Image (cartoon, grey):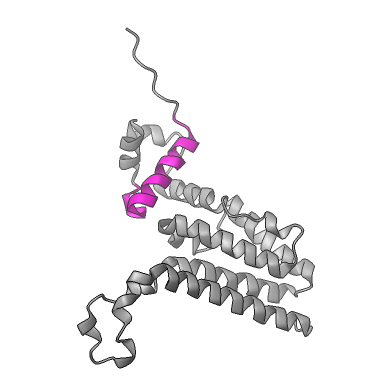
């Protein structure tokens, strides 16, 4: 009886397996040996497609960024486009939080990351912002979006109510974890709204430099 043929190993299969592993167990779990085991191949087979683990992680980061909707920058006012894009980016990062530390460093040489930066920057320039201010706005948006995904504010407080006996204003801090979504998502939405409203006010006043 003929032996069953092994599924063809491709870059796409490797990236999918690496992404699943990182989502489930974090960046440290993604080693070449572990990936080979997950894919049912010998370790050296991976090196035919990627020279290092760093290249694989970079490819995973690229695949994650590619999920962000940048089409919103076509046909929308810059304010609406920024808001829609930020929400899409935030949702993608919320689905893949373990990749956020990689993305927080910037687009590097990743095509999807550079295309996203081009879309944001281009929309701001086309709207009339100066190049310097457009750069500042792009950086500020990234700080808000990736920063909000790097960790949970609500989960940063211990659940022991007695811990806060000497901190009267924090007497309900132990309850925050139970309301994580409302706290963390509410904070992101508030920050985004305040940011865009402030930028819109400056724009309407002609302060674009």
Q: Quadrant of the N terminus?
A: top left
Horizontal side of residue 189 vs 78, given as left or right: left
Residue 44 x %, y %: 36, 33
How many numbered marks have been drawn onto this rendered protein structure?
0
Q: Residue furthest left?
A: 162
Horizontal side of residue 82 vs 164, given as left or right: right
Q: Is residue 197 a member of the stretch shown in magenta?
A: no
- Say whether residue 151 is visible: no
Residue 108 x %, y %: 55, 58
Q: Residue furthest top?
A: 1
Residue 114 x %, y %: 62, 56
- Say whether residue 89 is visible: yes
Q: Is residue 22 a member of the stretch shown in magenta?
A: yes
Tell me what residue is drawn at x 34 percent, y 14 percent: 3
The boundaries of the magenta stretch are 9-30
Q: Quadrant of the C terminus?
A: bottom right
Q: Who is closer to the viewer here, 204 or 29?
A: 204
Tell me what residue is drawn at x 39 percent, y 51 percent: 23
Tell me what residue is drawn at x 33 percent, y 37 percent: 38
Judge whether 97 appears above or below 15 on screen: below
Q: Who is closer to the viewer here, 25 or 79?
A: 79
Q: Who is closer to the viewer here, 13 or 105?
A: 13
Tell me what residue is drawn at x 62 percent, y 54 percent: 69
Judge whether 146 appears above or below 187 on screen: above
């Amino acid at each position: 009886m003929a032996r069953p043929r092994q599924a063809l190993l491709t870059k796409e299969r490797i990236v999918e397996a690496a992404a699943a592993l990182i989502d489930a167990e974090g960046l440290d779990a993604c080693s070449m040996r572990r990936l080979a085991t997950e894919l049912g191949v010998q370790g050296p087979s991976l090196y035919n497609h990627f020279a290092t683990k760093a290249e694989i992680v970079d490819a995973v980061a690229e695949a994650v960024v590619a999920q962000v909707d940048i089409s919103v920058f076509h046909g929308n006012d810059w304010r609406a486009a920024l808001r829609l894009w930020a929400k899409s980016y935030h949702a993608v990062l919320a689905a893949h939080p373990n990749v956020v530390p990689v993305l927080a460093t910037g687009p590097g040489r990743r095509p999807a990351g550079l295309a996203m930066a081009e879309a944001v920057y281009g929309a701001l320039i086309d709207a009339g912002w100066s190049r310097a201010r457009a750069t500042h706005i792009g950086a500020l948006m990234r700080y808000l979006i990736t920063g909000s995904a790097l960790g949970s504010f609500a989960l940063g407080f211990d659940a022991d109510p007695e811990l806060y006996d000497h901190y009267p204003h924090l007497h309900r801090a132990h309850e925050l974890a139970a309301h994580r979504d409302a706290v963390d998502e509410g904070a992101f939405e508030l920050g985004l709204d305040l940011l865009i409203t402030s930028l819109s006010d400056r724009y309407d006043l002609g302060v674009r430099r």
